[in-house]
Image (cartoon, rainbow, N blue to C red):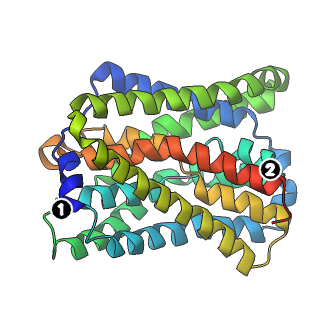
Amino acid sequence: MKELLSSLDALEINLGAGEMLLVNIILAIVMFGVALGIKLTMFKDVFKNPKSLILGCGLQWIALPAITSLLAIILNPFITPMVAIGMILVASCPGGNISNFMSSLSKGNVELSVSMTTVTTIFAPLITPFNFWFWGTLYSRFAEQHNDIPMLEIPFLDMLQQILLILGIPIVVGMVVSHYLPKVAAKLSKPLQKLSIVLFLGMVAVSLKQVLAELDPSVTAAILCVLSFVILHNATALSTGYLGATLLRVPKIDRRALTIEVGIQNSGLGLTLLFNPAIFPPEIWGHNGGMVLITALWGVWHIVSGLTVASIFRRSTL
């Protein structure tokens, strides 16, 4: 299987300047749409009783990257280092923008979901690069004993700048519009929420198109292998949220929100970071097909899994 996946790592996947700009604009619009639905009053009850929020951030920032690294080490005989590093990158990203909609669909605690998305996104400029560096370095030290892997040297300031531009500014502008122009925000919020799913899928499609353009049709089996690891990783993330919330005995509606929040990652951010040559220099990370493919496929699969889990929650007492 590892030999099969090596055919993906040999690929050099890069977006042109125009495609990269399009991806950044799409993600910025998506995050602006998310911010339009954020009102400070929504956080009142959550911050009065912050147990679930603190637990959720702990599961998102600590448990998920740690468990992902352990999973990558366990799977090391079967996966390539680029696939493993791609998994760690996804786990280091903040919660996904569609998690709030899915929490609502699941009859979970929407206020908690919005709070977690907001907090993890606001702190993403610090948490994402640190987690990727820390857990990625830990894995690479293990993997160097068994594989050839580039030295993991992540330029913190470049990653910080990228995340601030595509997450920080749209979130701030959206919250300002929501606060000072509530009628405008109300009119734009629902259409943008629906549009964000379409735009996000479009962004993933752009990335997948670039990957598939470089692939030989004979490597279909390799793509299916990567998809199987994405499904396993995503199931692990959803289970981390559900089991963590269950063990700490939080209310049912909070458990549902935490399950979805930890299982839905902002893989779009991961893609924009991967395509930034200042963060992943082509001369070092040029053969990054495995990383790009696992991040892009996550963006598609977590919508499928999230809607499935939300539907199960909606019809059950879990």
Which is more toward the observer, 77 or 158? 77
Question: Of the residues shown, which amino acid type is indicated by label 1?
Answer: Met
- Residue sitting at x 77%, y 31%: 178
Tell whether 197 sits left or right of 269: right
- Residue sitting at x 15%, y 76%: 145
Question: Of the residues shown, which amino acid type is indicated by label 2?
Answer: Val
Tell whether 23 sits left or right of 45: left
**Image quadrant where one finds the C terminus:** bottom right
Tell whether 143 sits left or right of 234: left
Residue 61: quadrant of the picture: bottom right
Residue 266 location (% of width, % of height): 52, 46
The disc label shown at residue 151, or none: 1
Residue 296: quadrant of the picture: top left
- Residue sitting at x 68%, y 68%: 242
- Residue sitting at x 62%, y 42%: 97
Tell whether 127 sits left or right of 318: left
Residue 142: quadrant of the picture: bottom left
Residue 18 location (% of width, % of height): 33, 19
Judged from the image, the secondary structure of the residue bearing numbered disc 1 is loop
| Whether residue 152 can be seen here | no
Task: Say how many tags the image has.
Answer: 2
Q: Which residue is mark 2?
A: 110
Is 201 drawn above or below residue 116 in the view shown? above
